[in-house]
Image: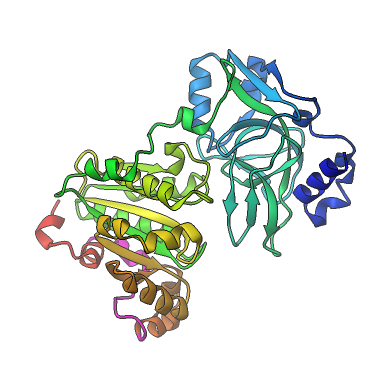
């Protein structure tokens, strides 16, 4: 019991410990039974639960099945894994006060709400470092897109994480349901995915950043918009990070004809994946986005270029061979200089620096003095001529 209480207090984090210490008097519902227990999940209960963006594929399938035939697996003998779907109850509201739903609407959370989310690991310097827990005791909502995980560290300027009480892992036909079971696309070995792409396929553009909130997604959205205005057919995706619908929606609104992210490949997040698995994800996404004959494929690589998985991609020669153009988003001149040096030193075809630093003319001028590629204001990429010139596309290609 002491270890369970310790797990709970760790999940709640120090600021909430005193207020919610009573939760540690007993284990979460999903952890309260010895061994492993399978129980029926009533259709009405399933319908009423708030389904997250990350679990959106489950909602579609459940509706097709009339919300029948599902169960819950719970007990002290159950250890969740990344990607497992869980029905959980909101036990304490913290940083995330709303849950991004299947349709990307942010739904307000209330104490006692039941939600359908997925377990996963999170790496977010501006928010949480979190890992999949070893049991179904109390845990945290660490991303608004719908991810359950145990907080290890948090940024000091944000609130403690919202606390979830797992009720049980969702099952069907006696098997725990995972995001991979429901995903629309398969992660293929990177060699197989690369072979599926024709040599004269689309121009493949990768967008990196110096960190979270460096302007990567906005850069992608604006670039997509400019290329669309030029009459080009653009497909876009986000290959790494933590599941959320905002970025996919931005790319779609910018004019991308097809948009996918890693959740479409059965992943709640890509943190802690092996380098080889990350390559499989990136190449599989590139192959999917290359289908249908687009002129350009634009893919965002999340987090900063020093983050483990991202750094491994930067150094990988197969990834380098896949990539035709690179843009780098950052917030200050020092990041621009360091990022450009790293990317160019790895042999990647960096063509421009953009992102948050371009909102400050003084910083942009500082950066222009220390990098060898153009500093392109993010929203200027919405202009057809700027977008095409940045990528070095010939004028005749850019005619609608």
Q: Answer whether residue 203 is visible to the viewer in this image.
A: yes
Query: Closest to the observer: 176 or 71?
Result: 176
Query: Closest to the observer: 120 or 367?
Result: 120
Q: Answer whether residue 383 is visible to the viewer in this image.
A: no
Q: Is residue 217 above or below residue 81?
A: below
Check residue 375 for magenta coloring: yes
Residue shown at 52%/62% (left/top)?
Answer: 212
Q: Is residue 365 left or right of residue 271?
A: left
Residue shown at 51%/33% (left/top)?
Answer: 179
Residue 19 point in image, percent of width and height: 87, 49
Residue shown at 35%/51% (left/top)?
Answer: 254
Check residue 213 for magenta coloring: no
Q: Identify the colour scheme used.
A: rainbow
Residue shown at 19%/65% (left/top)?
Answer: 392
Number of numbered discs visible in the structure rendering: 0
Q: Is residue 395 above or below residue 199?
A: below
Q: Is residue 45 left or right of residue 28?
A: left
Write down the quadrant of residue 354 in the picture. bottom left
Q: Is residue 159 left or right of residue 344?
A: right
Q: Which quadrant: the N terminus?
A: top right
Residue 71 point in image, percent of width and height: 64, 18
Residue 130 point in image, percent of width and height: 64, 51
> Which segment is the magenta one?
369-384
Write down the quadrant of residue 346 in the picture. bottom left
Residue 375 point in image, percent of width and height: 33, 75
Q: Taken as a whole, is the magenta stretch helix, strand or loop?
A: loop
Write down the quadrant of residue 225 in the picture. bottom left
Q: Is residue 200 left or right of residue 236?
A: left
């Amino acid at each position: 019991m002491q270890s369970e209480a310790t797990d709970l207090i760790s999940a709640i984090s120090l600021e909430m410990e005193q207020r919610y210490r009573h939760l540690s008097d007993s284990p979460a519902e999903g952890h309260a039974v010895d061994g492993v227990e399978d129980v029926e999940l009533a259709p009405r209960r399933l319908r009423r639960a708030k389904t997250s963006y990350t679990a959106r594929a489950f909602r579609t399938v459940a509706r097709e099945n009339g919300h029948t035939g599902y169960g819950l697996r719970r007990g002290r003998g159950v250890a969740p894994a990344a990607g497992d779907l869980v029905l959980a109850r909101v036990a304490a509201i913290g940083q995330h006060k709303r849950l991004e739903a299947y349709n990307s609407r942010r739904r307000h959370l209330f104490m006692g709400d039941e939600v359908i989310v997925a377990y996963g690991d999170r790496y977010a310097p501006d928010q949480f470092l979190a890992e999949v827990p070893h049991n179904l005791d109390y845990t945290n909502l660490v991303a608004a897109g719908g991810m359950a995980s145990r907080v290890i560290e948090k940024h000091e300027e944000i609130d403690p994480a919202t606390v979830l009480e797992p009720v049980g892992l969702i099952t069907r036909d006696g098997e725990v349901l995972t995001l991979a079971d429901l995903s629309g696309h398969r992660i293929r070995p990177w060699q197989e995915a690369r072979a599926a792409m024709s040599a004269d396929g689309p121009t493949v553009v990768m967008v990196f950043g110096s960190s979270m909130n460096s302007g990567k997604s906005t850069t992608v959205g604006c670039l997509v918009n400019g290329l669309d205005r030029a009459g080009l057919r653009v497909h876009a995706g986000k290959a790494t990070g933590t599941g959320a619908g905002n970025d996919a929606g931005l790319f779609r609104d910018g004019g991308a004809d097809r948009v996918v992210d890693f959740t479409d490949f059965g992943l709640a997040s890509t943190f802690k994946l092996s380098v080889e698995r990350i390559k499989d994800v990136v190449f599989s996404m590139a192959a999917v986005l290359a289908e249908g004959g687009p002129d350009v494929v634009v893919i965002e690589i999340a987090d900063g270029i020093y983050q483990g998985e991202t750094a491994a991609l930067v150094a990988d020669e197969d990834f380098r061979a896949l990539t035709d153009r690179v843009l780098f988003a950052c917030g200050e001149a020092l990041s621009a200089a360091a990022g450009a040096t790293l990317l160019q030193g790895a042999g990647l075809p960096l063509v421009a620096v953009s992102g948050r630093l371009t909102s400050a003319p003084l910083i942009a001028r500082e950066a222009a003095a220390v990098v060898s590629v153009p500093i392109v204001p993010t929203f200027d990429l919405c202009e057809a001529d700027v977008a095409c010139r940045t990528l070095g596309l010939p004028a005749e290609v850019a005619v609608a």
